[in-house]
Amino acid sequence: GDTIRVSLTEHPVKEVPVARALARRYDERWLGAPGELPAGTDAQGEAAWLEAVDPYDHRRRSVRETRFGDVALGGEQHVRVELDLGPVPTDADAAARELAVALATQPDVQCEGVGVAAAGATARARVSDFASALARAGIAAPLVLALPAGEATEIPVGVARAAVPVSEGVPADDLASAARAANAAGLPIEWMLAGRDLETLVDRALEAGAAHPLFSVAHERPVHALRRVVARLAQRASDAPIVLRHRSDATLDDERALLQAATDLGAPLCDGVGDAVVLSGFGAGRSVALAYRILQGARLRTTWTEFISCPSCGRTLFDLEETTARIKARTGHLNGVKIAIMGCIVNGPGEMADADFGYVGSGPGRVNLYVGKELVERNVASEGSDDRLIELIRKHGRWVEPV
């Protein structure tokens, strides 16, 4: 692409820093591209991707449903949200209690998987204790364990899914042993691809013989890498689910970290790729909430009230920021409801097409109210229009009283 368009519900000049931050990241990647990957790999991967999907016909990639613990992902399931805690804690009960407190700060969302990593016998010995500690703390999310292929011959009790790195240096016999251990335990195994020749890594993982494989990618260019992996899976007629993993770079300021998470995860989700999202580096509660917000932005899982609005421009017939803030204050508790607030009738009705209710400027001091795509009240006086909107929401059974 050559142009970035950022649309914010505020003065247009505030869009420029966000656009620059996005452009800077990809300019830096573009300038650093020569020599980073084998010649032609990206182009070949993109060509294979375009053979596997139709970029003009959005649909979620069709994959088999896979269960781990009490959670199912893939198939017709929602995109799941998991949390990566890093190395398995040394104090299991303290870590579990701390996690329970962090998750309690996000009562609207649910953590659907907890991941830890263990390398070496000492760390593996702590895994089952941590699984028990999670249960004692009231955390029902299944446990995902990342461990080297050579150490995956026995999977500790309490683990619901194994995650095994696959790189050029991992022996095929180790991958096959890990697959046999997962099959014997009746567990899915997530092949975490890390390397340049992703197509070969996909082949090696598939040939290891796991009964229920999943795939994830660790790569500096995650969107291109995922497209290459999905294209290769299509060539191999594999319907294995994809886990999207993102770890925040601790050296970044908060705004850049948020933008990176949103773009690295949002792009594949909008491509229709991804059956679980795993975030880390933002703190436990915030990581889970951010994952849900990215899913909501990608129109894949609506958790909170969704507000759709246009940027300010010369046609806007009211103060868009003030009006949006005012309506949001009264309706922000309506989880799962989509409300569009549009400044004019030129572009508003088209841009709000998937909203449940619409508030659209129709003239100075006047608004039109919509239910879905239907105009139901025309030229309503701005004064009192918020109450009329709420009455519409109530009339259609979507209103609940705020707590």
Image (cartoon, rainbow, N blue to C red):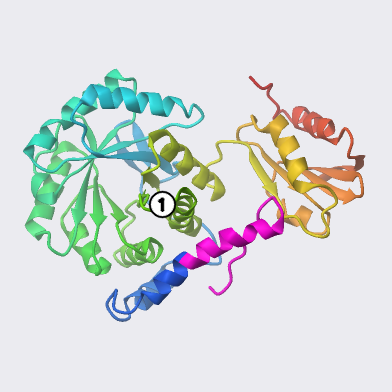
> In this rendering, would 332 be left or right of 114?
right
Q: Give the residue number, with chain letter if any, for mark 1.
A: 274
Residue 199's place in the image compared with 161, above or below, is: below
In terms of secondary structure, where does tag 1 sit? loop
User: Is residue 314 found left or right of 397 in the rendered image?
Assistant: right
Q: Quadrant of residue 305?
A: top right
Q: Residue at left 65%, top 36%? A: 337
Name the one closer to the observer, 391 or 4. Answer: 4
> Seen in the image, is 52 located left or right of residue 334?
left
> Is residue 192 within the magenta segment?
no
Where is residue 307 drawn, in percent x and y?
A: 67, 43
Q: Is residue 121 above or below residue 219?
A: above
What segment is highlighted magenta in the picture?
1-24
Residue 310 seen in the figure: yes
Q: Is residue 280 above or below residue 57?
A: above
What is the quadrant of residue 321 in the picture? top right
- Residue type indicated by callout 1: Gly
Q: Magenta stretch containing residue 23, yes or no?
A: yes
User: Residue at the location (27% across, 27% down)?
Assistant: 95
